[in-house]
Amino acid sequence: MNKMYLKCLSTLLFTLITIATFAQKTITGTVREVSGPLPGVSVSVKGTSKATQTDGNGKFSIAVNPDETLTFSAIGYARQEVIVGSQTTISITLKEDSKALNDVVVTAFGIQKQQKSLGYSTATVSAKELTEAGNTNFASALYGKASGVQVTTAPGGASSAVNVQIRGVNSLNYNAQPLYVVDGVVIRSEGQYGAAGRNNGGFFDDQRVRGNGVLDINPEDIESLSVLKGASASALYGSDAGAGVIIITTKKGAKGKGPTVDVNYFGTVEQPAFLPNYQNVYGQGYDRATNLAVGATEEGWIVDAQSPSGFRPNFRSYANFGPKMEGQQVRWWDGSIRSFSPQPDNYKDIFRNGLSSSANIALSNQTDNYSYRISYTRLDYEGIQRESGLKKNSFSLNSSLKLNKKLSVDVVANYVNTITNNRAYQTNRLAQSFDGFFGRNEDTNLIRDKFQTSEGYAWVPFNQTARNPAEAFVFNVRPNLYDYFWSTLKNTSAETENRLYSSATLNWDILTKLKFRGRVGNDYTGRNTEDKNYSQFPVAFNPPTSSTGAYTTGNGTYTTIYSDALLTYSDNISKDLSFSASAGFTSRKENYKDQSSGTQFGLVSENWFSLSNSYGILQTSASRRSLLKYGAFGILNLSYKDYLFVEGTMRQESSSSLPPLNNTYYYPSVNGSFVFTDAFKGALPEFLSYGKLRASYGVVANASLPYESNVSYGQNSLQTNNGSVPQLVLRVLMVMKTYSQRKNTNKNTV
């Protein structure tokens, strides 16, 4: 009896298994979009953990039962479901979902995620938002586009640096700018200036307003821009991301349109945004006691028999508490007779209207096997500061080639040629010095005519008339405005910069759920400068130990080699729980070299700009800096029912700027997101369409810049009667010496 029972039971189980086996079948098919096959689409069996992805030709294969439902989903496309039934092949066309596209965010290392899955704050700015205002660089176009992002543009327009701060100041010194990543590659922003930074030397340092690397990123080539805020968002980039990250994705060929030519042009007019609000009633003069002390009347007039009114203003006064300006005829500082009247626009007239013109042409295409976009942009810019300008040529290539079903290669290259003439000059010597103040009665156009003589020399003070008796000033004046025009309108500064930043990326679908990406990139800049300061007076009037004029030439080479590798595996643990795990490695090598040579104590022969024409011993300098950073990282993502998301990351990093035995550190982060409107559908009020809770924790900090953490002294050579010997100089003394040299150089050349 028992044997008969077991035999019947075995027969029944075999029959059921056979029925189930024959009931299940393999479905094949193709997923397409409007313009062609769509790879990378997730094809899953609803309510189970079975899933696959379409290959490079949009094809898939999966085993299902007739009563099951297939779900097709891809980022940027509307999800669709199909009941299998009696079908053996299924072909489906997915439609783009504009809302889904807007919800896609490019995060660290180019990983695309849905906005709702992020447990940290980000902001995305579109190409249209970056270009619609006609800004000459993308960083200025960020102004007001992303919350928590403060953009400050240095005066000088297209050639001047742009400061970007994400969530305020993140460091008291050193790197306070975000990390810029273009198509996955870290590019140079301000590394060429070293620890001192740019334009930080104060009143006696370089007065030209310097630029930074982000000016070379062409707004016309940007497809989208993501701002990663907070430590958790940027922890995967380690110490470089202490001030946040800006990730830029450039434009690619558009699919389905065939070869396309796009032409864009914009032109803008610039004016000074804010000017001092001065009174226009009283002219130059001091308070009553000071007026009397300097030999003027209580009101501020100085007796002058050659003035029609018998008086003249005190042109040396830095204050404007003097006589009322009522059109009195007085003798001016150049000896002419002029009206003592207010000049309400004299500060505005220091500047001019700036003009910018940008033309872009792009050729693009995308097919099933390749895509490309080739772009050229020409920017011509004349700044609001007279004689300053810039010409920039930008070339870009963004291409992709599918080698086979599993392999593809992306090649991106950008070449930028920039010629800058008379980079904008700071006006702090007009606003931060008594010698820079000038009266409300001064006509700027007159000063601009008189800052140099008819012979091309600098203006002649009242107490040095022997240089040019006919054109010497009659009265003493505050000199800085005249010197400012000499520096900006007479002296010249020319810069030529060539920059190439590029990358090559290999994408390999090893298995359906296992993907590999390897990337290598470079950023090279070659820079040449030439400054000419003209002789201020004939060499016959030189003092015994110096002359006037100066000539300086310099060059710089800045290179960055970047590489990264990323291996990602993703799968479903159950029908409700999915995960992805990634491991990666990054490295970056930076080299900065600068050389400069210049005359000292003026030029021997007037206006012969050659290093051989130095009055004193030539000043030469050369500097080099290197930095190596590398790190390994891991990422784990969990998703439950597409409304609860958790991510954890860890990065181990090493930097050559720290002591060898203590140069490795770790940056962990964790974040989570809970979309409660999806979790409690039907249980919430109708007016609450979307709601999410998020939380994050991360650690990010700045590493030391090169040669800042463990350098206590430098070595010079000391000349003695018995030859040269090494001289060790404490670092604080080196800094003081450098500052003193800058100050003395400025006195001799301005």
Image: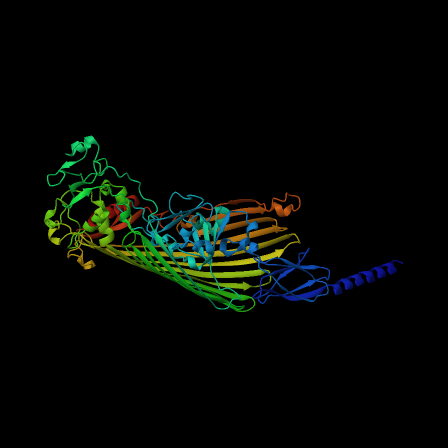
* Left or right of residue 267: residue 532: left
Q: Which picture quadrant has residue 625? A: bottom left
Count the marks: how many? 0
**Residue appearing at x 36%, y 51% in the figure:** 161
Quadrant of the rendering where the N terminus is positioned: bottom right
Q: Is residue 215 left or right of residue 504?
A: left
Pick whichever, 654 or 589, lies toward us: 589
The location of residue 38, given as percent across then percent down, is 58, 64
Residue 271 coordinates in the image, percent (x, y): 33, 50
Rendered view: 29 above or below 667: below
Q: Is residue 332 above or below residue 250?
A: above
User: Can you give x and y, in whole percent of width and height, for residue 601 in the image?
Assistant: 18, 51
Q: Residue at x 65, y 52 (%)?
A: 576
Residue 474 in picture, x, y percent from top left: 13, 44
Q: Residue furthest right?
A: 1
Residue 719 seen in the figure:
no
In this figure, which colouring scheme has been used for the structure? rainbow
- Camera-side residue of 358 and 574: 358
Q: Can you see residue 567? A: yes
Q: Vertical placement of 6 versus 299: above or below? A: below
Looking at the image, which is closer to me, 487 or 720?
487
Locate residue 570: give its quadrant. Answer: bottom right
Residues 446 and 376: in front is 446
